[in-house]
Image: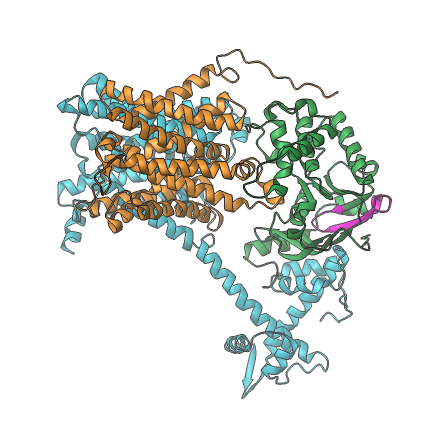
């Protein structure tokens, strides 16, 4: 049963991260996703201190706001202060992460978050932290409920605003010309990424969030040319990695988050080498544009 | 030679556009008649793309205003279509030709609505007009430069607009595509649509357009082709930059000066 | 305060080590970071930092010791490998660089974590302390480790000084470097190697995640203060050294405080301050410049109005009331009196009870503004073919910015005109 809960949590995280990750890598913003996933740390610590609990809604929102603030800061440093864009990302997230670590050290007694957990989470303990209703019903692990809710929200978000997200990722100038606000959708997407990061952070840690945001979408991108297929495929790849990673971790007696990230990497390498259309070891079909009659 | 027309479809009034405070277009004043095929012509860095982006409200303007069909752009977006430069997007994007053309219908759909049968028909019809219906399911990463341009054109056509702004649609396309596109544009003009095209080839300009805008950091001329494409006006357009003008522009940036007093 | 003197007297051998270590680590990575920043590859260092971990773990697993040289070798190999992998992915597939960096970073690190936890759980007693690569611990740098890492850090500094000229050209114009026969590939290799070494060494102080800051942040901060690369390197090194020392001091006074995050926090504050206040490029100093422009525009407008009031009868030195000025031009009354007072202090106007009059100096400056205004209007109509009723607004700005040299040039191009487009005389 424990294995089931752990893999389920992993799969839920994989689904919401990979779906959003597809947009991030196509917008060439993978590193912004990386930055957000690290920079929410002080938000989580502060929300933790204020609300005193781990998975209340105010905590999710409060820490999520910090993710959006990170995006604002990066944009601000880049546009207003004119810092080179990659440097703006690097400076912002390391600064916020350092604050987070310092806060953890200062309030070490009041927070049961430690540095290890920040980086690679404690998905192994997910099944222990159960949600028990007032009538005594055991409703399963808390993390499943938190991450599950966020996953549903993310899927809803993508379904409802599929065409806006798609168009602003492909051709922002054209989107603006037909009256779709590119910055609105940019910040909505980033809010979704922040919320996802915060919800997943505790279970899987910063590093697996980044791995899920980048690796399955990148793998799917090598396997298909259809965007909808890419979305579905990357979610499936993430789920597969969660399951395989769990057993790898059990076998090596190591961190589950680390093992899942490893498997996402293996998936990518396989696609990179053997993808039917784009693998570098496959006989690449030369695509010659047919002449127009 | 700046000819203003009665009842213009596009009216640009005293438009100054700056990048990073440095004006790249100074005080452009022009009007365009309905049903014209307009070429925007000038040397590199003259502000041709900037002009149409500013008209489309894709760039903040330092001063001046634009009216289309005698209304602010926000009111009439649905009647205007824009074809960005082909290089401005990533053609490795996972999308099919049909996906891209269908984007032309997004503006009319509004939030949450999915494309309906009618939208798909309109997209298919647009593809037909550019001779690409056979490629509907093809991935855009597999297209040649000319085909990419046709897809962009089809997307604009699917919008079924009254004015079209096209940024360098002839850049890097084969002769066959160029001829096909210009034929299409002429048909559109004959249907009463106004088409504004950024173009960099002087040779073909006279044959393609019936109205020409000459630009080089400022408006040099705007009027019917035969009156505008004269030796004198061309020399003025291509005869180098106005040094005082660019120096003043550099000063505005360096001194952090607003280009208009607030 | 006693802490302060105790720390900075460096009598405690431990303090000495930790400080020397932090300073060397921070400044050497700052110097190398300058080059990767200028090559627009700042975040690559982040990937290397994460990729070092599996190397360390593998080296430990294979050798069974924690000999710093062996761990360093392992770290070096995977760090280097990560850069090769990023290159291969971007050049051999349609994956873009940012995705490749994110991918390599998370996967290599994931593997590292897997190995590390696996080692930890294996019960091998020798493993304790491996996780300092994860979070860094400058305070624990002692003995053999310190010597090895300090030597590497010094080597890095020497290398950048020796190859300064070549590296500069590589960052500035790779193609040109190639044409004049520089071994560009070898130089790239050198820079990559330096980056990997800087990361391997710096990670001891601040840990994996924050390593990126040691490379990027001092370089980004230094970039705001100078346009000169030599100076930028020195500044970045100094900023790095300062934050290294400050971090060591903080954890000396409060041992519970982690050194690495403090170093990063301090260097980040320096950077953010630089972004805001660095003269010329800083955000605040640019805002300040804009403010100064505003008051200059106000003053010049007042002088202009007073000059114009005198124009019809050539009586420039007659006293005027504020209402006279307001009739001529819509400026808020408070702004007018503020501007006039400032002008009086500068000697451009005199106050005579409730009325104001121009001094000779003020008349000259007012005349110049009017003159530039009319010259610019003329220029716009003649060279830009603008209608004469559209040129006024533009000239309202430009009149304040034209330098004497430009004025001269303008006069030449307009062939020393007498009248402006509205048939007013150009004074």
**x%, y% of residue C377?**
72, 63
Identify the residue shown where x is 54% and y is 66%. C294
Figure colour of chain A: orange
The image quadrant that residue A241 belongs to is top left
Asked if one can make out residue A205 in the rendered structure from this viewpoint, the answer is no
Q: Which quadrant does the N terminus of chain C fall into?
A: bottom left
Reply yes or no: does residue A167 show up in magenta: no
Rendered-image quadrant of the C terminus of chain C: bottom right
Which residue occupies 53% across, 17% down? A277
Identity of the residue drawn at 69% across and 57% down: C409
Viewer-proximal residue among A287 and B99: B99
In screen coordinates, is B54 left or right of A126? right
Question: Residue C239 placed where, x, y %?
Answer: 33, 46
Is A176 located above or below residue C131 in the figure? Answer: below
Read off the magenta span.
Answer: B214-232
Asked if residue B230 is positioned above or below residue C386 in the image, the reply reads: above
Look at the picture and state if B49 lies above or below C59: below
Residue C51 position, x and y percent, is 33, 27
Q: Determine the colour of chain C.
A: cyan
**Quarter where residue A195 is shown:** top left
Toward the viewer: A291 or A161?
A161
The location of residue B78, given as percent across then percent down, is 67, 45
Residue reaching furthest right?
A: B226
Q: Is residue B231 magenta?
A: yes
**Residue at the outermost front position:** A135
Q: Is residue B137 visible?
A: yes
Question: Is the residue A69 above or below the residue C138 in the image?
Answer: below
Colour scheme shown: by chain
Q: In the figure, what tint was chain B given?
A: green
């Amino acid at each position: 049963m424990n294995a089931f809960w752990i893999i389920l949590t992993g799969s839920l995280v994989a689904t919401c991260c990979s779906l959003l990750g597809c947009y991030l890598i196509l917008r060439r913003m993978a590193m912004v996703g990386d930055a957000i996933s690290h920079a929410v740390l002080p938000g989580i610590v502060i929300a933790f201190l204020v609300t005193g609990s781990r998975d209340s809604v105010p905590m999710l929102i409060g820490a999520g706001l910090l993710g959006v603030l990170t995006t604002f800061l990066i944009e601000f440093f880049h546009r207003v202060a004119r810092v080179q864009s990659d440097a703006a990302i690097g400076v912002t997230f390391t600064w916020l992460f350092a604050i987070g670590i310092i806060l953890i050290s200062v309030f070490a007694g009041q927070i049961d978050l430690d540095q290890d957990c920040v980086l690679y989470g404690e998905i192994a303990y997910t099944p222990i932290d159960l949600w028990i209703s007032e009538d005594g019903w055991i409703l399963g692990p808390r993390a499943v409920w938190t991450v599950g809710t966020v996953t549903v929200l993310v899927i809803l978000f993508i379904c409802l605003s599929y065409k806006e997200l798609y168009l602003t990722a492909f051709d922002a100038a054209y989107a603006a010309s037909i009256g779709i606000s590119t910055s609105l959708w940019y910040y909505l997407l980033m809010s979704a990424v922040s919320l996802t990061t915060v919800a997943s952070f505790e279970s899987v840690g910063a590093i697996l969030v980044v791995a899920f945001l980048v690796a399955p979408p990148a793998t799917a991108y090598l396997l298909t040319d259809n965007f909808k297929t890419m979305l579905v495929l990357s979610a499936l790849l993430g789920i597969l990695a969660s399951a395989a990673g769990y057993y790898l971790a059990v076998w090596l007696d190591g961190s589950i988050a680390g093992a899942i990230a490893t498997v996402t990497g293996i998936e990518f390498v396989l696609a990179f080498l053997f993808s039917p259309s784009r693998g570098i070891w496959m006989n690449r079909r030369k695509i010659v544009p047919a002449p127009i009659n | 030679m700046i000819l203003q027309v009665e009842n213009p479809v596009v009216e640009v009034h005293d438009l100054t556009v700056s990048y990073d405070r440095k004006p790249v277009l100074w005080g452009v004043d022009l009007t365009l008649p309905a049903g014209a095929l307009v070429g925007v012509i000038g040397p590199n860095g003259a502000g041709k793309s900037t002009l149409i982006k500013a008209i489309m409200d894709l760039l903040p303007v330092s001063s001046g205003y634009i009216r289309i069909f005698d209304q602010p752009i926000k009111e009439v977006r649905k009647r205007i279509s824009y074809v960005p430069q082909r290089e401005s997007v990533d053609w490795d994007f996972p999308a099919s030709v049909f996906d891209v053309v269908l984007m032309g219908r997004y503006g009319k759909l509004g939030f949450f609505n999915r494309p309906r049968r009618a939208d798909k028909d309109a997209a298919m019809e647009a593809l037909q007009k550019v001779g690409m219906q056979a490629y509907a399911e093809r991935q855009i990463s597999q297209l040649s430069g000319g085909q990419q341009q046709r897809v962009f054109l089809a997307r604009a056509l699917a919008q079924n607009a009254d004015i079209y702004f096209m940024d360098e649609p002839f850049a890097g396309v084969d002769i066959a595509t160029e001829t096909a596109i210009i034929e299409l544009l002429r048909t559109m003009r004959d249907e009463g649509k106004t088409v504004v095209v950024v173009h960099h080839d002087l040779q073909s300009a006279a044959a393609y357009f019936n109205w020409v805008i000459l630009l080089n950091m400022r408006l040099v001329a705007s009027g019917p082709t035969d009156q505008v494409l004269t030796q004198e006006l061309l020399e003025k357009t291509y005869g180098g930059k106005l040094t005082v003008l660019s120096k003043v522009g550099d000063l505005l940036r360096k001194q952090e000066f607003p280009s208009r007093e607030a | 305060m006693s802490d302060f003197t105790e720390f900075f007297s460096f009598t405690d051998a431990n303090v000495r080590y930790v400080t020397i270590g932090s300073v060397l680590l921070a400044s050497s990575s700052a110097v190398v970071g300058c080059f990767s920043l200028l090559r627009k590859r700042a975040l690559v260092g982040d990937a290397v930092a994460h990729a070092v971990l599996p190397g360390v773990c593998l080296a430990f697993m294979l050798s069974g010791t924690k000999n710093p040289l062996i761990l360093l070798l392992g770290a070096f190999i995977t760090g280097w490998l990560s850069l090769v992998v990023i290159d291969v992915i971007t050049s051999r597939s349609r994956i873009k660089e940012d995705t490749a960096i994110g991918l390599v970073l998370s996967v290599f690190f994931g593997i590292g974590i897997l190995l590390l936890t696996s080692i930890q759980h294996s019960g091998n007693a020798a493993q304790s302390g491996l996780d300092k690569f994860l979070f860094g611990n400058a305070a624990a740098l002692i003995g053999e480790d310190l010597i090895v890492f300090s030597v590497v850090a010094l080597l890095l500094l020497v290398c950048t000084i020796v190859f300064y000229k070549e590296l500069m050209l590589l960052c500035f114009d790779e193609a040109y470097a190639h044409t004049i026969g520089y071994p560009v590939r070898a130089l790239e290799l050198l820079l990559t190697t330096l980056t990997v070494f800087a990361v391997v060494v710096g990670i001891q102080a601040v840990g994996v995640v924050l390593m990126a800051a040691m490379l990027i942040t001092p370089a980004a901060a230094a970039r705001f203060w100078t346009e000169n690369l030599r100076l930028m390197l020195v500044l970045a090194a100094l900023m790095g050294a300062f934050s290294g020392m400050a971090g060591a001091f903080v954890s000396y006074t409060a041992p519970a405080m982690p050194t690495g995050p403090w170093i990063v926090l301090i260097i980040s504050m320096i950077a953010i301050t630089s972004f805001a206040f660095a003269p010329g490029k800083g955000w605040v100093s640019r805002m300040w410049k804009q403010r100064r422009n505003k008051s200059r525009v106000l003053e010049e407008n007042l002088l202009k109005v007073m000059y114009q009031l005198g124009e019809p009868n050539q009586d420039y030195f007659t006293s005027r009331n504020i209402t006279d000025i307001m009739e001529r031009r819509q400026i808020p009354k408070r702004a007018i009196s503020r501007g006039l007072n400032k002008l009086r202090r500068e000697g451009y106007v005199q106050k005579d009870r409730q009325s104001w009059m121009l001094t000779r100096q003020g008349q000259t400056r007012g005349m110049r503004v009017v003159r530039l205004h009319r010259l610019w209007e003329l220029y716009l109509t003649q060279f830009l073919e603008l209608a004469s009723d559209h040129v006024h607004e533009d000239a309202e700005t430009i009149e304040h910015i034209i330098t004497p040299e430009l004025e001269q040039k303008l006069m030449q191009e307009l062939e020393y005109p007498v009248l402006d487009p509205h048939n007013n005389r150009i004074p």
